[in-house]
Every structure is written in structure tokens, then in C-alpha cells.
Image: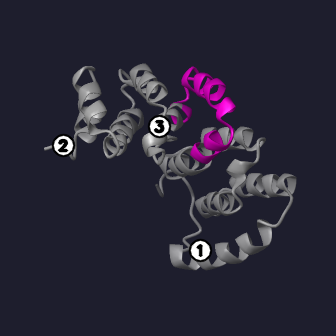
Amino acid sequence: MKNLFPFLGIKKPIRSVAEKACIAECKKLPYDQLHEFITALWQKEEREYQYCALVLMEAARMYKHEKSIELFETLIATKSWWDTVDTIASKCVGGYFKAFPEKKLPYIERWMNSNNLWLQRTCLIFQLSYRDKTDVELFFACIDATSKSKEFFLQKAIGWALRQYARTNPGAVFEFVNNRELKPLSRREALKHFT
């Protein structure tokens, strides 16, 4: 990733100490100030600032604020790479759609139609921790809509999400995988723990 983003070179243990102090102060801020601060962190060049924004969003439980979905969408589509998108998708967006289920379908539909691979990847993985609360129909529909893609990050996300859901419902995943034409990477990842 050093070829994609500039880094300050701060190791994670040192960064964690600095983030802890920042979080203690910042999570007390009103939502609008917190939003502004996270946006400012995201706009900085060095990647460590984006990592700090992720930690802060999670600690401040930004997913509990109805307006946060627009922020999440912007961050997913800006300075995009798996290291930030996966955290936003699984922790922030996943938490948000649990808190505001009525927002789920309009955003998923919009993101699936966006042709932005990172927004589409979010649609595939936001339910990673949902287990038996997974909206299976939506989950499988998102896979069907992206399964022919040549994008590595979509193929990998399909396999990862299926493998994760197989821990809850292996029968459904096995049946789904065997009744779809998935890319080899997606299929391999999905069936990794099946013997």
C-alpha cells in the first residue's frame, strides 16, 4: 500500500496511544463537529489520518446518527482501498443499517447501481457480523448482481461474505454456491472451510 498512499511511518502501537487520547476528547463532541473533524482527517494525505478517523468513528458510534450514512458513503468512495473500505462497510455501515433498517434498501440499490466497486463491495460485506440476522435474499441478490465481475476485490468479497455466512448457515451457502456460476476465486473462498 506504500505505493498507493503516503504514510507518516508511525507504527500501530504508537498510533494507538495517540488515537486513544484523541478519542477520549473527540467522542464527546456534538455530531456536527465530529463529522467535520473526521472529514478533515480524511482529507489529509497520509494514511494514518484515515486510520485515526476509522477508530474515532467506531468509538463514537457514528452509526447511531441518522445523518452518518452520507459521510460513510463519501469516505467509502474517497481514498478507497480495502484497508479503509472493509472497516467502514462491516462496522459503520453494518451498524447503521441495524439502527436504521428503513435506509438499507434505498442505499444498497443506489450503491449496487453506482458502478463504484468499493460501494458494491460494501453491499457484499456490510452483513459480515449479522449471522442469523442476515437479510439472505438481499445478500444473495447482491452476489448475483456482481458475480460476473472481473474485479478482484468483488470476487474476493463474494467469497469472504459467503464463507462468513456459512458459519451460520452452511447448507444455504453450499446450495447457493453449487447453483450459481461464480468466478473461481469466489467459489474457492466461499468453500474454504467445507470438507
Percent x, y of residue 91: 56, 51
At label 2, counting other C-alpha atoms closer than 10 Å, the crowd grade (few under 14, some 14-19, many 20 or more) is few
Residue identified by numbered label 3: 134
| 146 to the left or right of 43 | left
Secondary structure at badge 2 equals loop
Percent x, y of residue 12: 52, 73
At label 3, counting other C-alpha atoms closer than 10 Å, the crowd grade (few under 14, some 14-19, many 20 or more) is some
Tell me which segment is drawn in magenta: 94-119
Give the alpha-carbon distance from disc 2 to disc 1, as whole Å.
38 Å
Q: Quadrant of residue 156?
A: top left
Residue 11, can we see it?
no
The amino acid sitting under disc 1 is Arg
The amino acid sitting under disc 2 is Phe
At label 1, counting other C-alpha atoms closer than 10 Å, the crowd grade (few under 14, some 14-19, many 20 or more) is some
Q: Which of the two discs, 3 and 1, labels the residue nearer the N terminus?
A: 1
Name the mark on residue 194.
2
For the point 46% across and 34% down, the residue is 124
Residue 95 colored magenta? yes
Looking at the image, do the residues carrying marks 3 and 2 touch, with CB atoms under 8 Å apart?
Answer: no
| Mark in front: 2 vs 1 | 2
- Give the prevailing secondary structure in the magenta stretch: helix
Location of the C terminus (image quadrant)? top left
Residue 155, can we see it?
yes
| Mark in front: 3 vs 2 | 3
Percent x, y of residue 5: 55, 54
Name the mark on residue 27.
none
The amino acid sitting under disc 3 is Thr
For the point 69% across and 53% down, the residue is 42
| 107 to the left or right of 37 | left
Residue identified by numbered label 1: 15
Q: Nearer the viewer, residue 160 or 14?
A: 160
| 193 to the left or right of 23 | left
